[in-house]
Structure formats: structure tokens, C-alpha cells
Amino acid sequence: MKYSLPRGTRDVLPDETKNWQFIEKTAKKLFSLYNYIEIRTPIFEQSEIFEKSIGASTDIVEKEMYTFKDKSDRLLTLRPEGTAPIVRAYIQNALYKTYSPTKLYYCGPMFRYERPQAGRYRQFYQIGIENIGNAHPFSDAEVISLGMKIFEKLGLTNLTVSINSVGCSVCRPVIEERIKQFIGANLKKFCPNCIRRFDENPLRILDCKNKKCITYLSGLPDIRGSLCHECADHFSSVLESLDSLGIKFIINPTLVRGLDYYTKTAFEIISDRLGAQNAICGGGRYDVLVEQMGGPPTAAVGFAFGMERVVMVLKELKMFKEQESNLVFMAPLGTDQQIKCLQLADSLRLAGIKCDMSYSKTDLKSQLKIANKLNAGYTVIYGEEEAQKNVVLIKNMKVRTQEEVPFKKVKEYFINENLL
Ligand code: HAM
């Protein structure tokens, strides 16, 4: 019987992990420059945490959560996103007492039972930040700018920041009323989901992906016209600060995003290299979530990007460079020479030089074959003749040259070759 991985998941194979590490390294470097520190939360949480924060009438909570009961009958959910668990951790550990504002970043797998397609998985990997305790519109701009900086550093081009304001508890009822008025008698033409959400959560109708619903919504008055003064001022200030940071954006008046916790700013970073799943990053402000989940009133803003989508775009742009190999492969010819090479490999590794050898082969041809397979930069050949002369032959696998080096000088040789 052959086993295969569950639908909607994927293996990140060895030749891809270096690309993932490159993205992680680039993001982490920038997070640190903006003074973010890492937080790691569990992969599963009490289901209620997600129901309460993401919202009961969102697609994620209604149909995409991996929820199960454990052996003690606790209702748990594999995290579909990182914001709610981080807010839970922030409150539970009273982080506001230690760090304020609290600038946190996270990386890890998320789980949503969605219909798999290119760029959409049931287990996917997010890298994100949460800036908790910062109400100023400049912090929205800083968060968006940090996202763009990461993508810029990675070499991603043709990105668009799509931005909107979804209002706050003061103006949200006005926005919702306008949407309901606009839809009015046309409601019966909408999909069953939208009909149900009309009374429950009309803002969600703007997020419907059904083509017919999108058509019926055309002509909807810009929801920015219904924003309260505070939200309107905040939004103008975010846009001005984006301008001053040189970040181009487009205002998308129907962008509400699929999570209920957003207030004021909501944004996405879109790549023109992806198909239907073209958002590589999504985020926004959530000024009431901390309080809603039992913490003190605390404004916050953040984003998360999807690793698989970023990898897809970078691959298409051929941005992943083949790295120069710095692996040294030991090729002892004969069992007597093996132990000397084992010792030599040990001392090279101690000096910080990457080294490998095969114990099962002792002839040159098979060992060179393995060295090639491993993409070694150098092979150290050590046969009977070399042992007698107290030297090794170092073969540069790229330029195919070979030179004799005293056994005692091998480490020095590789240090001079900049292999550290
Ligand atoms: P989100 O828009 O649901 O936001 O997800 C963020 C990003 O994760 C998306 O833009 C996309 O790149 C990636 N993503 C989402 N679902 C999938 C999937 N099924 N397969 C592959 N990639 C996916 C959030 O999760 C919020 N927590 C972001 C946030 C942080 N807002 C404030 N702080």
C-alpha cells in the first residue's frame, strides 16, 4: 500500500527548504530592525478563541476550522490564523505590563479546511507581526511599509497595496445600514450565504466571492462616505504617511477582508503573478479585539503573509539563486585511510567547515559520484600513496582542478578558500 499526504497539504522538500529559510531569514532580519520579537504559541487553542475573534459568521468559523474534541471532551481547533492566539497570549501573560507597545512576530503553520487550488492549502505557513498597543495611524503605515520592505528585499516586483477603512463601532452600524439599503429588494438574487448574512453581518456580503453577488454590488456607494470623523481622519493620515514613505496604494472600497475583528484600516498586498489567490499578505487594525477577549482596551495592527504564495512568485521570477556549494567531501581510498579521514572531518567541522563522507564506499569512482550527487564544492582524496607522502589531493569539483596539500594544512587551505 502506498501512502500519500492529506489533500491540501504539501511536503517542503530538501531542495525547497533553503528557499524557505532564505525568506524567513530576510523577514526576521527586518523584524528585528523594526524592534519586533518572536512569539510562539500552540498550534491548537480552545475553539471559542477563534469563534469569538474571527467572528461566527465568517467563512473561516462557519466552514473552515479543524475542530475536534480531545479525550477530555475539550473543544479545540487547529489555529486557522495567528492573531487571535497572540492576543490570547498577550492577555494571559499580561504582556502589556512588561512591553508596551508590544511588537511581536511569528512564523508557523495555520490550518483551514478550504477547497485546495494553486496557492491555497489546508495547511499553509504564515509569517506575521502584531503591533499591540499602538493607536497612531503612523503605526499602520509602518506595518504596511515593513511588509513591503520584506518583499522588496526578497526581490518581489509588481506588488500593489490595496487598502480600505472598515470603520469602528461608531460608524459600522451606519455602513451596514447603507449596504442593506443598497441591496434592498435585490436581496433574493444574492447567494444563500449573503441572504443569511444580510441581517447577521452585512459587511461580510462585500467579501462574497460569488460572481453574481459581486455584480449586484456594483454601484454600491463608497463606504468611506459613512465613516465617522475619527475613522475618516485616521484613514487620511494613514494614506498620507504611506505617501511620505513612498508606498503606492490603491483604495479598494469593497475590501473588508474575511475576519470580523478589523476596525479602521484593512489592507492586502497583491501580486500580479498569482492567479485567483493573489493576496500574498493581508492585515489591518483591530482596536477592540484585546478588550473583547478580556484584556484592557488596547489598539493594535498587524499583518501576515503566506509563505507558499511568496515562494510561488519568487520561483516564477527565478529569484532563487543556486548557492555556491561549500561542502567538503572526504574520499578515503581503502579502509586504513577511512579512520584518518574521519578524524580530519571531525577537526574541519570543529573549525566551522561543512564536511561529509561515505563509510560504505572506499573506491574513488563511487565516492566522486556521491560527491557530485551531494553537490560538494571540494573532494579530499586520500589514498595509500597520499598517506605515505603525508598529503591529500584536493579536487575542486567546480573547476575540476586538483592540488596536493600537506595533511596538516588541509584546515588552513579551506579557511583560505573562505569556506567558513
Ligand atoms: P489572512 O488574509 O486570512 O489574514 O491571511 C494572510 C495571508 O495568509 C494571506 O494573504 C495569504 O497569503 C495566506 N493564506 C491565507 N489562507 C491561505 C491558504 N488557505 N493557503 C495558502 N495561503 C493562505 C490573517 O490570517 C490575519 N491573521 C492577518 C493579520 C495579522 N491581521 C492582523 N494581524
Image (cartoon, rainbow, N blue to C red):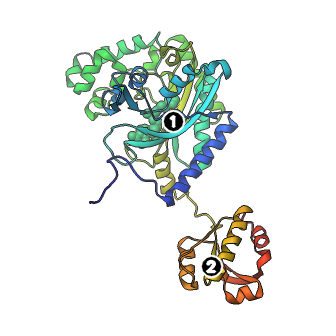
| Residue marked by disc 1 | 304
Q: Secondary structure at mark 2?
A: strand
Compared with residue 30, is residue 69 higher up or lower down, i.e. above or below? above
Q: Is residue 278 visible?
A: no
On-image quarter of the N terminus? bottom left
Q: Which residue, given by chain and number where applicable, does mark 2 sit on? A: 331
Which is nearer the eye, 134 or 149? 134
Give how far across and how far down residue 213 sits, in percent: 28, 29
| Residue 393 located left or right of residue 372 | right
Residue found 55% across the figure and 48% down from its top: 157
* Residue 256 at x, y percent in the picture: 42, 26
Q: Would you say the beta carbon of the disc 2 residue lies within 8 angstroms of ligand 1?
A: no
96 is higher (above) or lower (below) than 418: above
| Left or right relative to 179: residue 14 | right
Image location (x, y in percent) of residue 52: 41, 19
Determine whether the residue tagged by mark 1 lies in a helix, strand or loop. Answer: strand
Image coordinates of residue 323 in percent, x first then y, are 61, 63
